[in-house]
Amino acid sequence: MENVARLLKESWALVEEHGERLCGHFYARLFLLDPELRKLFPVQMSGQRDRLLEAIVTAAQTMDDPETFDDYLRGLGRDHRKYHVTPEHYETLGVALLDGLRSVAGDGWNLEYDQAWRDAYAGISERMQAGAEADGNPPFWHAEVLTHERHGPDTAVLTVRALQHPLPWQAGQYVSVEAPRYLPRTWRTYSVANAPNEENVLEFHVRTPDGGAGWVSGALVRRTRPGDLLRLAAPMGSMTLDPDSTRDILCVAGGVGLAPIKALVEELTRVNRTRWVHVFYGARHPDELYGLPGLEELVATHPWLSVTPACSDDPDFAGEAGDVSEVVTRYGPWTAHDCYVSGSAAMVRATLRALAADDVPPDHIRFDTFGAL
Ligand SMILES: NC(=O)C1=CN([C@@H]2O[C@H](COP(=O)(O)OP(=O)(O)OC[C@H]3O[C@@H](n4cnc5c(N)ncnc54)[C@H](O)[C@@H]3O)[C@@H](O)[C@H]2O)C=CC1
């Protein structure tokens, strides 16, 4: 496995900078091999391209950590049931991927790399299919929007009820969401922002980036209304509580990265008696700390919980100033804590670096990659 991981990383370096070309080759080959597959993808493909690369990089990067690799891919397989993918589709995808890699890497490619990617892809598709087969849940859930609250121009908090079947998620996990009325066949992942409950109600925090990118987020923030139907796919992700751990807990959230942290804190209000829980919650401006009043209510009734808000772009903020990753280190050391980190890829990266510099053991830290780290 180590050798395969090394070969994958080495060969990935040959194509990494040519992401656009790789995707172009891959999809051209894929739709040539099986024109029917085109129907599974959205009309407009640009967002889809980054997602394929992200998935490949994440899979290749987690290969040297077999447990994470296995969980991640089984989850992805369960999630992909929403597309009704068949074993033949997996095979065709493998052929197209190898063709794409070979053409883009050019002369640097060799037989060893080829074999490593074929083995890796076989491992990936085997685990994804095993995950899908073992899942007795429906391939997706219809969910009705119950409430929709705007917080400023680009953020919304919405709640939905999954219809017909229970949707079994764990606090800290995320699901793929589609808004078929506005953007059919385009799915994006969002963390569930509340703990599991008998009402089958899920909360999402969505921010749409400036300048119109992030179409699903744009539809969820600006157009979605109570009564709309969304579709949700199988829960994924490993940012969950370790029931056997007795360590105190550090949570670090940037912006709408608060979502899974809020779910974890909610879950802890049900089960925790003995662990101190510290939440650091960063936003650029005080008016973007939309989740603070809710957290402060929980602090008032749970003596083990503390929350430290921080603003990175407002020198007049009465609390902590700076990026949340820096603020956390002022309060360390965190070596004896379980650490949960959630936010933009840059924020997660900065926080992981800060925790590593403080000698926090890597196996105490949980995060999910939203975008390539
Ligand atoms: N499980 C997860 O990891 C989840 C991640 N997200 C992601 O969280 C992000 C949140 O975005 P916004 O609300 O727009 O947050 P934002 O970009 O406004 O940032 C909020 C705060 O994060 C910190 N931060 C941002 N960039 C940083 C950097 N380069 N280095 C250090 N700290 C940095 C700062 O404290 C900043 O004030 C989105 O990209 C979303 O996809 C959202 C939900 C769950």
Image (cartoon, grey):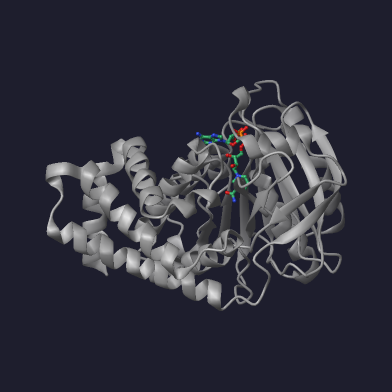
Q: Position of residue 236 (x, y in %)?
A: 59, 62
Relative height, residue 351 to residue 151 (above, below): below
The residue lying at 53 percent from left, 44 percent from top is 329
The residue lying at 49 percent from left, 36 percent from top is 46
Left or right: where 110 falls relative to 169: left
Residue 150 in which image quadrant: top right
Indicate the quadrant of ligand 1 in the picture.
top right
Q: Position of residue 87 (x, y in %)?
A: 44, 70
- Which of the pair 223/258 is nearer the observer? 223
How many callouts does the rendering have? 0
Q: Position of residue 203 (x, y in %)?
A: 77, 52
The residue lying at 50 percent from left, 43 percent from top is 48
Q: Is residue 237 visible?
A: no
Left or right: where 373 falls relative to 2: right
Residue 125 in which image quadrant: bottom left
Q: Work out which quarter of the rendered image holds the C terminus and state it.
A: top left
The residue lying at 49 percent from left, 44 percent from top is 371
Q: Position of residue 307 (x, y in %)?
A: 72, 47
Relative height, residue 53 to residue 242 (above, below): above
Q: Work out which quarter of the rendered image holds the N terminus and state it.
A: bottom left
Q: Is residue 327 visible?
A: yes
Relative height, residue 11 to residue 166 (above, below): above
